[in-house]
Image: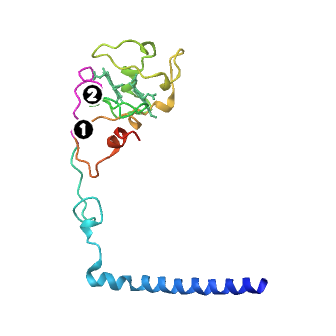
Amino acid sequence: MGKIMQKEAKSRTSLRFSVGVALMAAVLSAPANAAQGLAIPEDSLGLYNFSVLEDRSPDAIQFKGGDPGTNKRIAKSYHTAPPMVPHSNAGFLPITRESNLCKDCHFQPGMIGMKLEAGMPVPMPASHYADVKKEELYMGRWNCMQCHQEQADVKVLVNSTFGKAVKKGR
Ligand code: HEC
Ligand code: HEC
């Protein structure tokens, strides 16, 4: 039995060896293919329709929200998604260790569950506090911009199929 297995093992090794040689040959001939005009053009390598070697600045983004208190809340993409910021953040950023203007309006532990009138800041939910009753913010939520973003109309490079997938019930 031992002999047969040894034989088989030997033939497998030689098969692997010849596949290896074939692969190597393919790799070595790749530059030759490129020289024959089969190389991918520079402007087809990236998502943009210009050369990847060009260094163009992206278009400036115009955010569309008005001052806080003048905007409609935006429907969430899905349950538990962080809601989008419907208002302008002009003058509130950056958030630093010492200053957080978002918190000045949204840190409202006493308002959780209250019916909101138009123009009232939406209170941060209970998940954002270490302890709602003791009115302690959970510091893992300090950098609001990590999860909540201002909105702008921008052209996307690749369209999302997310909404369609949701409608199909996936
Ligand atoms: C001057 C008070 C004020 C400041 C400062 C402020 N907001 Fe608001 N925010 C509001 C009000 C009021 C609303 C309700 C929508 C409206 O009327 O504009 C709101 C809405 C939101 C919402 C939507 C909540 C929901 O459930 O729809 C998010 C998210 C939000 N703000 C995040 C932020 C972040 C992040 C910052 C800091 C960069 C910030 N806000 C600064 C007052 C403020
Ligand atoms: C780690 C991500 C994260 C950070 C950081 C964060 N949030 Fe949120 N926020 C969420 C999510 C997710 C929700 C949706 C409710 C939930 O699941 O807790 C939410 C909900 C909210 C709401 C809506 C409450 C409601 O009743 O609809 C407001 C307002 C808000 N956050 C404000 C803020 C502010 C202001 C900060 C900064 C001080 C902040 N958040 C930091 C993820 C975050």
The secondary structure type at the circle numbered 2 is: loop
Quadrant assignment for the C terminus: top left
- Report whether the residue tagged 2 is closer than 8 Å to ligand 1: yes
Q: How is the image coloured?
A: rainbow
- Is residue 58 or residue 12 the one in the foreground? 12
Q: CA distance from mark 2 to mark 1?
A: 11 Å
Residue lying furthest right: 1
Q: Residue 87: image x %, image y %?
A: 27, 28
User: In terms of image quarters, where does ligand 2 lie?
Assistant: top left
Q: Does residue 70 lie above or below 153 as drawn?
A: above
- Which residue appears at 32% of the width and 42% of the height? 164
Instruction: Tell whether 4 sits left or right of 168.
Output: right
Q: Which residue is mark 2?
A: 87
Which numbered tag is attached to residue 132? none
Q: Residue 44: image x %, image y %?
A: 26, 66
Q: Main secondary structure of the magenta part?
A: loop
Q: Is residue 133 magenta?
A: no
> At label 2, which amino acid type do we have?
His
Q: Is residue 69 magenta?
A: yes
Q: Does residue 11 lie above or below 166 as drawn?
A: below
Q: Residue 43: image x %, image y %?
A: 24, 66
Quadrant assignment for the N terminus: bottom right
Q: Does residue 35 lie above or below 166 as drawn?
A: below
> At label 1, which amino acid type do we have?
Ala
- Is residue 141 or residue 168 the one in the foreground? 168
Q: Does residue 125 lie above or below 81 as drawn?
A: above
Q: Residues within 10 Å of mark 2 (few under 14, many from 20)?
A: many
Q: Which residue is mark 1?
A: 152
Q: Which residues are magenta?
A: 61-73
Q: Are marks 2 and 1 in contact (CB under 8 Å)?
A: no
Task: Find residue 29 and report its image quarter.
Answer: bottom left
